[in-house]
Image (tube, grey):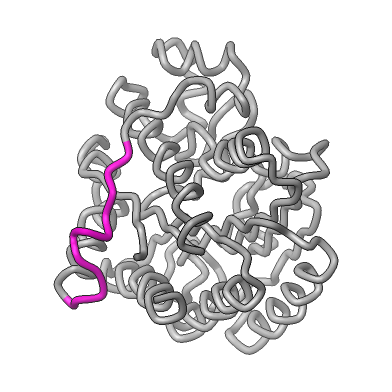
Amino acid sequence: MLKIAWSEIFAHSLPDGHRFPMLKYELLPQQLIHEGTITKDNLFEPGLLNEEYILSTHCKTYWERLSSLKLTQSEIRKTGFPHSKELVHRESCIMSGTVMGAEYALIHGIAMNVAGGTHHAFTNRGEGFCLLNDIAIAANYLLNKKKLNKILVIDLDVHQGNGTAEIFKNNKQVFTFSMHGEKNFPLHKEKSDLDIALPDYTDDKFYLKILQETLAKLIEDVQPEFVFFLSGVDVLSTDRLGRLSLTREGCKERDKIVLNTCKINSIPVVVSMGGGYSEKINDIIEAHANTFRLAQYIYF
């Protein structure tokens, strides 16, 4: 069974100014249930993550200041969110969703988080709507608790996974691959193990050719035991912040390439949704829904 992390807190603990882009956390599971792609049995509700797992990735002093609401005003501005207990609680639940998803993926081959993809969170700071890094925390969980030796991060959000790159820059057990917009946020890019920076207006054909070739080589060279896939839909031509030109079908084909690759090679995968900022909420929901539809079709 496809297991999907979801909680009402994903959608209902954010300030008013951020409600529109976050509507997807409420509408996406509703759409998937309405159309019959999933049932409520597919959803699991994560609770707060054990502090031990957060501290395996993030500095103790940062976590203590974050959780006790003692970040500076400059640090708060960089995250993009007003600081609150509710927000920290939300972030911890999102982290738990990806960690629990990793456990499910080891059993079922795949698991998904309706939220997550918080790849701009660094070891000691947050930025870009990311306070903690769910993929990094879950990867360290697998390395420490499950004794895995090699993990591949496939980050296809339109923004570089700078926080993830920083966290694992000296860790040879986690290979970080980020394919992103060259001229997009963040202005200062970190160095992933492999970065592919795409020019503005990159279309389906160019994007998919590069991804297909790169992914095949990575699987052969890295030999990963586990994959984390960040499937941001801000690569769409309709995205207000993306600057790329993928169609919805192109985005779907992107996800198909990644999921088929993991399935064929028997590599467990956890999918985090990442960003999506199109003007029309339907463009965001449909693009994300395609990822879940493909997961059901390919795996179950």
236 or 299: nearer the eye?
Answer: 299
* Residue lying furthest left: 34
Q: Is residue 137 left or right of residue 209?
A: left
289 or 300: nearer the eye?
Answer: 300
Is 43 magenta? The answer is: yes
* Residue lying furthest front: 107
Q: Is residue 125 above or below residue 258?
A: above
Magenta segment boundaries in residue numbering: 35-46
Residue at 75% from the left image edge and 77% from the top image edge: 216
Across and down, in percent, residue 285 comes to 30, 68
Residue at 62% from the left image edge and 65% from the top image edge: 267
Across and down, in percent, residue 77 comes to 47, 28
Across and down, in percent, residue 292 comes to 37, 70
Q: Quadrant of residue 93?
A: top left
Residue at 62% from the left image edge and 19% from the top image edge: 59
Across and down, in percent, residue 201 comes to 60, 77
Q: Is residue 37 above or below residue 83?
A: below
